[in-house]
């Protein structure tokens, strides 16, 4: 039924529409992915100010009509993340994080772990220039897989359950594999395996480090898992 609802949200993307409006892609705490129309937001004088720009965390009141898009009727800033916008590396990492959420989580169902993870990522990138690293971005993406239900098997062979000699990764099997199940897999260095394990268990602010070769393999494992199981293709983390 049409009506209004209130929710926190992160603005993932904003698209110009008409002369003064914007279509917003939002990830909300209460409803998951929501599309919304912000009317008049591009006018010089607008009651929304700059609060509906990408990467803003906002508290919204949205009117749900009969169409596919809600209408924004009120917006209050929770966190604007101004500092990350001043640093190119931080801005790129924040944009990558929002794009990953946009592509992976398209359901209009709440996923609070995913919402909280995105909010934490944006806050860290705003607070700490040192968070804009490849290792940190991969740790975020791996935790997002976990929140979405696509976490890889890393403790035992994803095919047979053996716990020894796990030196390869198979996206089709869903994780690390032993020599007897390595058909269609690629080699996984111990450092890459360790990075994947630690990135899942450590807090995001304490993302592990690893050599570049290990990070490339971890990136491949995450990317191929997404493609095979979630049917989502993301750009590799550079």
Image (cartoon, rainbow, N blue to C red):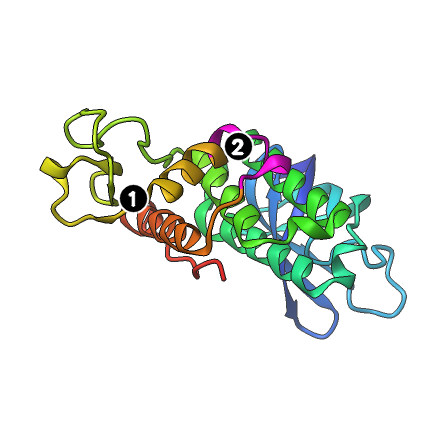
> Which marked residue is nearer to the observer: mark 2 or mark 1?
1
Identify which residue, 82 or 33, lies in the foreground.
82
The residue under the point 26% across, 45% down is 171
- Which secondary structure, mark 1? helix
In the rendered view, does 164 fall on the left or right side of 34?
left
The residue under the point 46% across, 51% down is 211
Is there a contact, CB below 8 Å, between mark 2 and mark 1?
no
The residue under the point 66% across, 40% down is 119
Q: Position of residue 204 (x, y in %)?
A: 59, 36
Local crowd size for mark 2, using a 10 Å CA cut-off: few (<14), some (14–19), many (≥20):
some
- Which secondary structure, mark 2? loop
Local crowd size for mark 1, using a 10 Å CA cut-off: few (<14), some (14–19), many (≥20):
some
Q: Relative to 223, say whether 173 is above or below.
A: above
Outermost residue to the right? 45
Q: Position of residue 133 (x, y in %)?
A: 59, 53
Distance from disc 2 to disc 1, alpha carbons, whole Å, reads 18 Å
Residue 229: image tag: 1
Q: Which residues are magenta?
A: 200-208
Question: In the rendered structure, which disc, 2 or 1, sits on the residue that comes first in sequence?
Answer: 2
The residue under the point 87% across, 56% down is 47
Residue marked by disc 2? 111
Residue 82: image tag: none
Q: Is residue 204 magenta?
A: yes
In the rendered view, does 69 fall on the left or right side of 173?
right
Q: Quadrant of the N terminus?
A: top right
For residue 149, which quarter of the picture?
Answer: top left
Identify which residue, 33 or 121, lies in the foreground.
121
Q: Relative to 155, say whether 189 is above or below.
A: below
């Amino acid at each position: 039924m049409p009506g209004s609802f209130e929710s926190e949200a992160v603005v993932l993307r904003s698209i110009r529409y008409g002369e003064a409006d914007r279509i917003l892609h939002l990830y909300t705490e209460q409803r998951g992915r929501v599309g919304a129309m912000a009317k008049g937001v591009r006018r010089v004088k607008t009651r929304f100010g700059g609060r509906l720009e990408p990467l803003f965390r906002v508290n919204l009141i949205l009117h749900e009509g009969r169409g596919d898009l809600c209408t924004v009727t009120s917006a209050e800033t929770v966190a604007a993340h101004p500092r990350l916008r001043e640093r190119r590396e931080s801005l790129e990492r924040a944009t990558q994080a929002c794009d990953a959420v946009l592509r992976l989580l398209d359901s209009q169902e709440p996923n609070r772990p995913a919402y909280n993870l995105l909010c934490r990522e944006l806050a860290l990138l705003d607070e700490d220039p040192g968070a804009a690293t490849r290792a940190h971005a991969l740790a975020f993406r791996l935790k997002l897989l976990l929140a979405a239900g696509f976490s890889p098997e890393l403790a035992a062979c994803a095919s047979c359950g053996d716990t020894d000699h796990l030196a390869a990764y198979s996206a089709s099997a869903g994780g690390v594999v032993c020599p007897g199940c390595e058909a269609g897999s690629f080699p996984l260095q111990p450092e890459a395996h360790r990075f994947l394990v630690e990135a899942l268990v450590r807090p995001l602010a304490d993302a592990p480090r690893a050599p570049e070769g290990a990070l490339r393999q971890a990136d491949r494992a995450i990317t191929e898992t997404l493609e095979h199981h979630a049917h989502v293709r993301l750009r590799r983390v550079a």
